[in-house]
Image (spheres, helix red, strand yellow):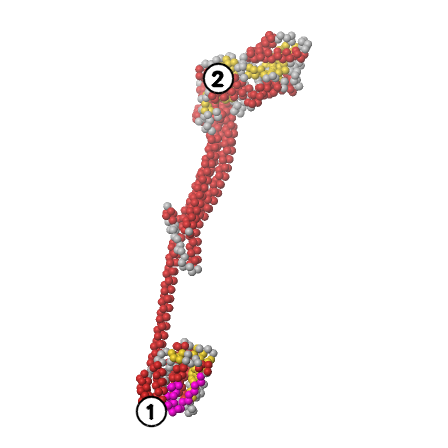
Amino acid sequence: MDENEKVGTNKRFIMAGVLCVVFMLTCTIGGIIFFKIQINKSAAYRQANTYKSYEKYYVMIPSEQKSSFWEAVYEAAGEMANENDAYLEMFGTNLSEGYSETQLMRMAIESNVDGIILEANEAEEMTALINEAVERGIPVVTAMKDNTQSERQSYVGISSYNLGREYGKQVLGLVKQYEKREGNSIDSILNVMVLIDANAEDTSQNMIYSSIQETIEGMNKSGQKISISAKALNSQGAFAAEEAIRDIFMGEDELPDIIICLNEINTTCVYQAVVDYNKVGAINIIGYYDSQTILKAIERNVIYATVSVDAKALGEYCLEALTEYDQMGHVSNYYAVDTTVIHADNVSEYLGGAASEE
Amino acid sequence: MKNKLLRITLQTKLLLAFVATTLIILMVNVYMYYNINQMITQLDEIYLSNVSLNELTESLLDVQDNMTDYLNTKTSDAMEEYYRAEQEYSNKINKLNNITTNNRLQRMEKNIRNISDSYLEMTNQTIEAKRGRNVEKYKIRYEKATELYEYICTYIYSLNNEQFMENTGSYKILSLSLRYTEYVSLTILLVIAFCNIVIITIITKSITKPIRRLAEKANQVAKGNLEVQLVEVRTHDEIAVVGKAFNKMVISLKEYINQIKDSMEKERQMKEREFMMETHLKDAQLRYLQAQINPHFLFNTLNAGAQLAMMEEADRTYEYIQNVAEFFRYNVKKNKETVTLAEEIELVDNYIYILNVRFSGDIHYEKRIEEEVKGQLSRIQIPSMILQPIVENCINYGIRNIEWQGLVVLSVYERENYVCISIKDNGIGISKEMLSGIMNSQLKESDVSTDSNGVGLNNVISRLQLFFDDEDAFEILSDGENLGTEVIISIPN
């Protein structure tokens, strides 16, 4: 009995000892594993060896990096680039200094990138740069704005003529409303102001302007007299466009009835100015692009209509052009992108869509 | 395995416990320190990329400065310096990333590398043009190179910033990890310390348990329980040695106690035998003394004389001889250890009669027996041949040579629990010295009168004392010279 008890206690002792050792080992090993995890975590964060590498390195140089339009274009193009083992970078966003398009272009060329998507202009300097890039074997695709003189591989954008026609149609739609509202005031002349970038040396604005003119004159079946004028805004330098637009409201003796904006920034600025100077209803805006601000303005009936370019399609076409050139050695000279008109009737679907996108 | 475990000594056990636990703690500590060290190294390395970028900038500045210097001075020193700087910068540039990834930092590196390549080409061309004294060209190239230089500077600066931000993130994570590591280390150390305490407790318990068992057994032995179970010794450590010694001690104790018990028994037996021998000796002496006064022959002769006197019708002679014969017959008949008091008194009567015949009735004798005792006379047992020698002594020493009429009084009375027999004479008495001499059996043979019939007072005293096992059974009283003597025999009733 005593003997058994003794053996029992001995066994218990040994069991306790073994348990202790096991517990200790578990703790130690657990701790060590924890260490490893911690170290690996930080190491993984630091070394970031998991980065995906790509074969091609494309860059996108828009004139205005921060606009939501170009961001949408970049997003669409970037996704497509990923699918084609390429990486698209909005060039210059990481840099501590803001560079002009030409400087960025120069940097891109010197960086020896594999392709450039460029919102070009008709400047000679730009032509030279595009040509240099092409010479160095870097394909250049111009988007939205072309440099027709250059040897760029392809142009992706809307036809200025079509865009002008679209604007003209919207003006005529507005004219009908004026007729209804004002009844017999046929003698009064409806002033239409087209805001044009004074520094743009390209012809597209001229194309659009003449197209608007043509459309309004050709299709105006009412007796309403319409006067179309172009207002050149000096956009050189930061915030110049905004100031120029304010100047119109401040300085002009007679404000136009309809203002046509050809880019997003101008649209937003005019909208804000109309609100600020209490001209809602007096001045109708026909804008460009479908940013949230613009869409909301349409919803509130401050902006009559906006002509939107399918940014996703634009981005995809740009990349398609680059990829195709890369693979085939040649590419179609022109990719046309559709335009859509958004007004108060159909703005809700864009608003909803935009909201869900965000 | 178990046997091996049992064979471990105490020292080794303790050593094992401490060494094992210490080793575990040490190992864990070393590992932790190693980890922490590694983390700190990583921490140090975090901003290394920034440092190298700064170096890159310096190197770039060097190239640009040296180029400008050469353009300014056209010294060979400046050119040498330029080429050195160019080489250095080129080496640094070649270490930069050259792959397109979705990591903007790596892409920036790639761009820096590519622009730098262009830049270096441009600077080289500039130097060439300068050497060729093509003023137009080198100016243009210089401007281009400077433009590129500025781009690169901006790029490196931007990359530096971005990296710094990223590194700060890493630093935060690492420092957090370090903090976690601290906590985990502390926890592990605490747990291990706790476990170590438990293990040491277990080990020490396994060491002290046998000691306590040993102490328990020792206590039992101390209480006198030698029949305790021996301590079970299974291990081979120092305690086992003590246990074995204890077991040996218990066994030896048992053996010694048994030996002592045996010797005590033997001693007791020896003493008993000694005592027996003594009693036997006494018995022999008694028999011998009795034999001294056993006159068979005389008795037979006297019987014959009595028959003769009867035939010759000499009645007084017959009676006399008859009495003498009675006297001697007593000896023959009662030749055994004990007789009754009545028989002894009768013997005294016979003796007195004989003496009176011999000394013509000179001896006066009185018997005073208390009525209560009379009935007991034939019941009370005393050694034989006791009273007669005393009476003989009285007559021979007490009253033989006195001027006045001698008287011997025999009285039997009861006192307390004793039946007392008193034999008193009115003779010459005994001096004090003589008295103590008699009582201490120091009388020499020469002091005993040769005309006694041989049974000395000494004999009587020792026999009485032996018989009753009482020193005071015999008593001689004398008031002094000529004041008579009294002998009192006290028989326990």
- Regarding residue B427, the answer to whether it shows in the image is no
Q: Secondary structure at mark 1?
A: loop
Label 1 resides on the chain identified as B
Q: Amino acid at mark 1?
A: Glu
Label 2 resides on the chain identified as A
Q: Amino acid at mark 2?
A: Glu
Q: Is residue B51 above or below residue B291?
A: above
Q: Which mark is on residue B313?
A: 1
Can you give x and y, in whole percent of width and height, for residue A148 in the image? Answer: 51, 12
**For the residue carrying disc 1, how many other residues have a C-alpha within 10 Å: few (<14), some (14-19), or many (20+)?**
few
Q: Which mark is on residue A204?
A: none
Can you give x and y, in whole percent of width and height, for residue A272 in the image? Answer: 62, 20
Magenta-span inclusion, residue B354: yes
Magenta-span inclusion, residue B478: no
**Residues shaded magenta:** B348-369
Label 2 belongs to which residue?
A320
Q: Secondary structure at mark 2?
A: helix
